[in-house]
Image (spheres, grey):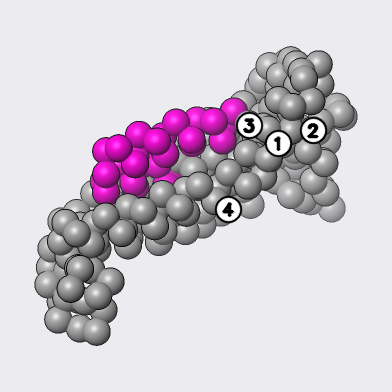
Amino acid sequence: MISALDGSSVDGSVYTAVVNLARRSPVWLDDTVSAWSTYGLVLFAVLMAVGWWHARRVGATASVTALAVPFVVVVAFGVDAVLKLLVREDRPCQSLRVTTLEACPAPGDWSFPSNHAAIAAAAAVALLFVSRRLGAVAVMAACAMAVSRVWVGAHYPHDVLAGVVVGAVTAMLAMSALRRRAEAAALRLAATRLRPLLVVS
């Protein structure tokens, strides 16, 4: 049997307060937050596509930077997934046995750090390297995603905070490293059949 950590001693009281607030809130609010928590990551994909589309009009280097964003997000997700396996913290709905808006995941679906928060934060930070405006929208959306994961009962606050840190730091390191090589990569790729992905003909 796999031993698991109980994170309720960290901020279980805050988690319980948020979950109880959600249970007393209007149905329309809970439905909206639940929908965002479940499907909100699609917005980040849309922002990445918009960032790439506009980058093509700026130049090949900008396009390389924009095209790197989804790959950076995948890397952040991978880092987060490895941490989940190392820490193995039970979901709060299992440890505290509370009624939540989102169905409680099965044992073994670890809670720390939050995948959703890591993906959202990674996308937001990476998009800041592409466009300040898109990045600002993504940052606000990432904060909303992190809060929503606690609201629906999927994570403790420390889970989403850790996810944000993992995603943001991973994206910052990856995009900073890419920035030093983006121009050289753009020159090479612009000479191939991939040129239409990088610049407007």
Dominant secondary structure of the residues highlighted in magenta in the image:
helix
Which segment did they paint magenta? Answer: 122-147
Question: Gap in Å between the C-alphas at discs 4 and 1?
Answer: 23 Å
Of the two numbered discs 4 and 2 in the rendering, the one whose residue sits closer to the viewer? 2
Is residue 62 covered in magenta?
A: no
Question: What residue would you read off at disc 3?
Answer: 148
Which comes sooner in the sequence, label 3 or label 1? 1
Amino acid under label 4? Ala
Residues tagged 3 and 1 counted as in contact (Cβ below 8 A)? yes
Which comes sooner in the sequence, label 4 or label 2? 4
Which comes sooner in the sequence, label 4 or label 3? 4
Amino acid under label 2? Leu
Instruction: For label 3, count other residues whose C-alpha is less than 10 Å away and answer few (under 14), some (14-19) or many (20+).
Output: many
- Say the numbered circle drawn on residue 52: none
Q: Is residue 179 above or below residue 158?
A: below
Q: Residue at x 84, y 53 (%)?
A: 1
Amino acid under label 3? Ser
Q: Residue at x 50, y 30 (%)?
A: 143
In the figure, is residue 93 to the left or right of 182? Answer: right
Is residue 144 covered in magenta?
A: yes
- Say the numbered circle drawn on residue 101: 2
Residues tagged 4 and 2 counted as in contact (Cβ below 8 A)? no
**Would you identify the image quadrant in which residue 53 lies?**
bottom left
Q: Residue at x 20, y 83 (%)?
A: 192
Residues tagged 4 and 1 counted as in contact (Cβ below 8 A)? no
- Say the numbered circle drawn on residue 34: 1
